[in-house]
Amino acid sequence: MNSIMKDINDYAGIVLDKVTNWLDSLIVMLPNFIAALLVFIAFYIASKYVRKLIYGIMNRITKNEAINKLTASIIFFTLLIIGLFISLRILNLDETVTSLLAGLGIVGLALGFAFKDIAANFIAGIYMAIKSPVNVGDVLEYQDVFGIVKEIGLRSSSIRTWQGQDVVIPNRLLMEQKYTHFSINKQRRIDLDVGISYGDDLEKVEQVTLQAINNIDFIDKQ
């Protein structure tokens, strides 16, 4: 019985020493932890402000909504990651920073193989934001979808049909397959079938038709 009590006391002493060491370490690291937390919060607030600022600047440079949002988001997350790494350095977690960088590379490679379609859509979204003639507000027809481009995201694009429905299309499909762009040339020819009876005066029909067409304001008279 005495032996058991002695073992219990020994184990309790070991646990107490461990807890005491942890508390001592926590007290020593507390200023650094508070400083690291404040640095990360400051970077987060600054990143949101910079994102809003960059978005405003990009709106003055280009009217491409997709590339404006993409540029602002990339800068936001870049500043946020920098703030995270600086916070870890303040906590003297240099090895953790190195491990994170190495881990991000390995995880990125693994995710690239596991989610190749998502990665393809992401790359296509970036390309569409930078080089593609498709922009928010353009009129597009893709297969049986016909409407206005509502949003160009990093993974997919949204087209609002004339019936008010939003159709989401993966970006890579818009890059790989054929679509019809009705806004890029700023002009469009409309063919209308007009039916008349055999007894109508063809010259009068032509005169009335041309007069009706010429009264339309947005018609190109050339």
Image: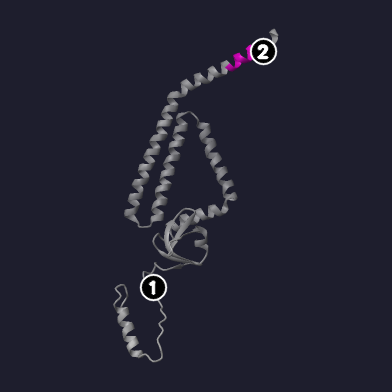
Q: Is residue 120 above or below residue 95?
A: below
Closer to us: 113 or 6: 6
Image x and y of residue 5, in percent = 66, 10
Q: Is residue 91 above or below residue 141?
A: above
Residue drawn at (43%, 47%), measured in percent from left and top?
Answer: 74
Please check the rendered image and state whether residue 9 is part of the magenta-colored stretch, yes or no: yes
Answer yes or no: is residue 222 visible. Answer: no
Closer to us: 43 or 169: 169
Which quarter of the figure is the C terminus placed in?
Answer: bottom left
Answer yes or no: is residue 18 visible. Answer: yes
Residue 7: assigned label? 2
Give how far apart the Cα atoms at labels 2 and 1 are. 91 Å
Q: Which badge, 2 or 1, comes first in the chain's sequence? A: 2
Q: Is residue 189 above or below residue 206?
A: above
Where disc 2 sits, the SS reads helix
Numbered-mark total:
2
Please check the rendered image and state whether residue 98 is part of the magenta-colored stretch, yes or no: no
